[in-house]
């Protein structure tokens, strides 16, 4: 009877592990994505790259380091990952420091996008550059890419 109980517990543990793996949304989308950055439907960085790294089952970090409109944009954003019918959604916000003539300016960023089971990604990166001068304002950047 003790052996049978131990065997049952062992099978239960395997079953629980498989269920947890199945719900590891962040692992399902982790990887390197290559594509383009667009603004207003026009390509602004034709060969861009984004990396999505798993933090835990439902959280991932999106990283992008590109030159956009003459500015170095180095974003590292912690995101929540959810899933509905083979479509994964990532959403989060962060700030990156933009160099403006020797002064570092914190720039708010909101990331919201989808990645499907085949690795096709559409990620909206909304940037709000503070100030009133040239280069200030809201910028809606879209990354369209594919997991490599």
Image (spheres, rainbow, N blue to C red):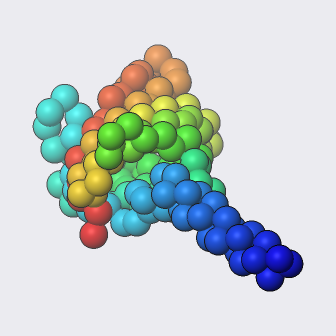
Q: Residue 41 at what x, y percent from top left? A: 14, 33
> Left or right: where does residue 1 sit relative to residue 99?
right
Residue 117 falls in image quadrant: bottom left
Q: Work out whether residue 6 can be spotted.
A: no
Residue 69: x percent and y percent? Answer: 30, 43
Please give left or right for residue 46 compared with residue 105 in the image: left
Q: How many marks?
A: 0
Residue at x-position 33% and y-position 29% = 140
Q: What residue is at 58 percent from the left and 49 percent from the top?
A: 59
Image position, residue 86 (x, y; %)? 32, 46
Against 12, residue 136 (above or below) is above
Image quadrant occupied by the C terminus: bottom left
Along the viewing direction, whichever of 50 and 3 lies nearer the viewer:
3
What is the residue that sits farthest to the right in this orientation? 2
In the image, taking residue 27 as reference, residue 122 lies left or right, namely left
User: What residue appears at the point 44 percent right and 49 percent down from the top-left corner?
Assistant: 73
Residue found 51% across the figure and 21% down from its top: 131
Q: Residue furthest bottom?
A: 3
Closer to us: 33 or 59: 59
- Nearer to the camera, 61 or 55: 55
Residue 33 appears in the figure: yes
In this view, which residue lies farthest toward the top?
Answer: 132
Q: Nearer the viewer, residue 104 or 51?
A: 51
Image quadrant where one finds the N terminus = bottom right
Residue found farthest to the front: 1
């Amino acid at each position: 009877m003790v052996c049978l109980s131990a065997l049952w517990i062992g099978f239960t543990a395997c079953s629980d592990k498989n269920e947890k793996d199945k719900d590891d949304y962040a692992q399902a989308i982790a990887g390197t994505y290559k594509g383009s950055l667009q603004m207003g439907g026009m390509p602004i960085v034709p060969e861009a790259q984004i990396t999505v790294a798993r933090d835990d089952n439902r959280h991932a970090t999106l990283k992008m380091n590109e030159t956009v409109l003459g500015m170095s944009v180095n974003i590292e954003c912690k995101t929540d990952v959810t899933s509905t019918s083979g479509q994964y959604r990532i959403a989060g916000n962060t700030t990156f420091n933009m160099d403006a003539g020797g002064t570092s300016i914190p720039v708010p960023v909101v990331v919201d996008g989808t990645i499907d089971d085949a690795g096709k990604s559409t990620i909206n990166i909304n940037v709000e550059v503070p100030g009133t001068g040239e280069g200030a304002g809201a910028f809606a950047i879209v990354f369209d890419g594919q997991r490599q």
